[in-house]
Image (cartoon, rainbow, N blue to C red):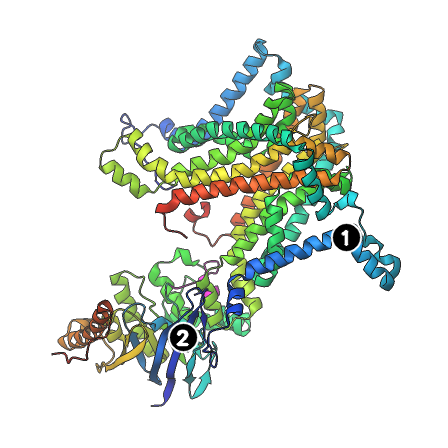
Amino acid sequence: MSTQTVIGEGHVERPPPLVRWYAEHRRAVFGTLVAILFLLFWEGLSRGWWADALRPLIGHAADPLLVPPIFISSPSRIAAEAWRMFVVTREIWSDLRFSAMEYALGLGAAIAVGMPLGLASGWYRRLSYAVGPFLAGFNATPQVALLPLIIIWVGFGLAAKILIIFALAVLPIAISAQSAVRTTDARLLKVAHSFGAGEWHLFRTIILPSAVPFLLAGLRLAVGRAMIGIVVGEIFGSAVGVGAMINRSGSRFETDKVFVGVLVIAAAGMLLAELVHQIERRVEAWRPSV
Amino acid sequence: MATAEIELDAGASAHPSTLARFYREHERSIIGGGTLLAVLLIWEGVARSGLVDPLFLSSPIQIVKAGIDLFEGGEIWTHIQVSGSEFLLGYALSVAIGIPLGLATGWYRRLSYLLGPFIDALNAVPRLTLMPIIVIWFGIGIWSKAVVAFLGAVLPILIATNSGVRTSEARYLQVARSFSASELKIFTSIILPGTVPFIFTGLKYGIGRALLGVVVGELYAATAGLGYMIGEAGDTFQTSVVFFGVLIFTATGLVSVGVLDALERRFETWRPKAGAAS
Amino acid sequence: MAVKLEARDIRLEYYQPRTDTRLVALDGVNLTVMDGEFVSIVGPSGCGKTTFLSVVDGLIAATNGRVMVNGRVVSRPGPDRAVVFQDASLLPWRTVERNVVYGLECLGIADAEAKARARKFIDMVGLSGFEHHYPHELSGGMQQRVNLARALVMDPEVLLMDEPFAALDAQTREGMQEELLRIWLQAKKTVLFITHQIDEAIYLSDRVVVFSGRPGRVKEIIEVGMERPRRLTVKREARFHAIEDRIWGLIEEDLKSRIAGDRPPDTPRD
């Protein structure tokens, strides 16, 4: 009912095309407009447009509307800095390569450990009882607090970064895998049982296929969580990596560079989440859309 | 759980012994507690055997001792106070802003068009990456951590509340309209009660995010706080102190979520018990 | 007897922006219900009977035509009409009592008075003692009783009932039908009742309106003409079956023509 409107009295003609186009893309139109206004406002703050415009009216009360770029940078400065780092000096590429490697290894390890553990504890009730307290405790802990321990164990190197990314990503994966098995449709299990399916066969033909959407949803969560690891893992004395670059630039008040780094990580996060989402849509083709 | 699990062991007669019955009724706690105990014992054993440098591993008893020392030394109270204020400030702020804004953006479509782009953008950025900028803005005192905790917690709360409002069941809205309920009445009698479970989900999720913000902030730049204490202890290889600090965070997370669970149950006496888990 | 409810030339069109098409849901529906009368509307699913009820309640504004209660034109929901909703639609976070007083609350009636009035109708639908139960603690039949009490407590001129028993099992449904007639005789209300169950419509009503679908129109109105009070056993009498056959024939025609894709010529039935 939401996509159709009742035609009221005296309004039987359909609306003109422009109005219809707007009605259909209202969200996008609004969003773009708001985004552009926001960027303009930001740019104006750092260039003093608003302060200059209002000074004749309200005098020095307008001064706070000029914010030095060292605090907030500006869209144009960020764009220029990004151009410099990606194209002119190409300095960001080595950081990207390093971060991508630690990310891939950390997330890979989280999948390799989290999925089997989650699936098994969903399937074997007693195993879930055994690991339950550990999962609950680990889940309640801000995993980043483990960083000092990790550094004691493996030092400042690549291994520490991989481990912190692993620690952040493993839980969403394990927990979603566990609940995936648990919420398997009992009717399907009954059908399979009545056909005399063995345990392993049951797992492979019923549990696993119906678990895939959950696993992917967990993965999508984990992709975002693991991004935190890039920044946090490189807090301490890392020389390379996007996170290290952000931290270094922050301590030198190079705000433009910080924003470039933040945006790069955000973009990478969105890209990966979208990738998982696309896979989800492929896999879920058999399922009625909601 | 989808399937009710009723198992009868082959050896079990119609009247199992009291011990077996006790086990069956408390299997979860027995296995869970047993495993936990076993892990602690093995940990202690390995640490005492000298196979692994205690510097790396610490041990349960050493951790407890470190905890006692910390409290006797008194210094930890400052750290707890600092971290506690950061957490509470940030979390309270995110509740105070996230819930009303979530309700408002769910209720007024235009407002959601206006704020949607910002919310989506902020949600896409891992907020902890903003840490360096926040320190530039707010310094290394408690406010920068409160802000990071706030940024972490406010979005889950806001988004959960918003989707709670938007998924209000059409049939209840229709009932209200049919009884000529005013907009305010619709909001208080239909929208709000239906959104409560969503709000709690957001609140629980927000706890973890706020704690994470506090820890990262204190590890990054601070002069006090439990995260700072952990970082310092790590630098000086006081492994037991690090473990104890981590455990304080774990306990905080568990207790906070437990309190919210209890609160939720009080709010939700109307819910069928079986469905509450979903 | 006076005319209580009148719907004249109700036409309803939807505009669907996605396909840029217009959909006629109701096409010139005329209906008159007398004071104290029980009228049912039956028809194939999707024939617009529930939509028609929403128009009468004022939840949906008609493109053309008007609805009158006691000769006054109504265009929005009001206390002169109350709906008994499909699948009960009780607010799950309210107890039975709080659900029943909901409409009175919306009118701004003081709590004490609202509760006193609610008590009478909770009693009438046979739910005394369940005032403080939550909907999930009640059976489907009991939930429908609360639904009915919630509408009756408004003391409406017309009671609009939207397939209220559709979700109940067969035995409970029959029990509720008998219950409804008892309450109807007691409360003396004018009722417009929507259902897809032909026997339910006949058993309950003075007249049965047969709708045809797409667009929704009144195909025929049938006088039931059986004495009241009615026992459930009336459903097994020959005259009951005769009416049932006739209505079924009308609906079947409609379904067949819909499957065939166009309307067949009006052939007299034998």
- Residue at 63% across, 52% down: B118
Magenta stretch: dominant secondary structure: loop
User: Where's residue C261, x and y in %?
Assistant: 24, 69
Residue A286 on the magenta segment: no
Q: Is residue B248 visible?
A: no
- Residue at 59% across, 36% down: A227
User: Where's residue A52, x and y in %?
Assistant: 83, 57
In which image quadrant can residue A206 be found?
top left
Query: Mark 2 belongs to which subunit?
Result: C
Residue C98 on the magenta segment: yes
Label 2: few (<14), some (14–19) or many (≥20) C-alpha neighbours in 10 Å: many
Q: Tell me, yes or no, whether dots 2 and 1 are on the same chain.
A: no
Element on which disc 1 rests: helix
In which image quadrant can residue C199 be found?
bottom left
Query: Mark 1 belongs to which subunit?
Result: A
A91 relative position to C227: left or right: right
Label ID, residue C13 = 2
The amino acid sitting under disc 2 is Glu
Query: In the image, is residue B171 above or below residue A282?
Result: below
Query: In the image, is residue C59 above or below residue A196?
Result: below
Residue placed furthest toward the bottom: C1
Instruction: Determine which residue is flagged by label 1.
Output: A45
Where's the N terminus of chain A, which quadrant? Answer: bottom left
- Disc 2 and disc 1: Cα gap in Å? 51 Å
Q: Nearer the viewer, mark 2 or mark 1?
A: 1
The amino acid sitting under disc 1 is Leu
Query: In the image, is residue B65 above or below residue A42?
Result: above
User: Where's residue B6, x and y in %?
Assistant: 32, 36
Magenta residue span: C88-99
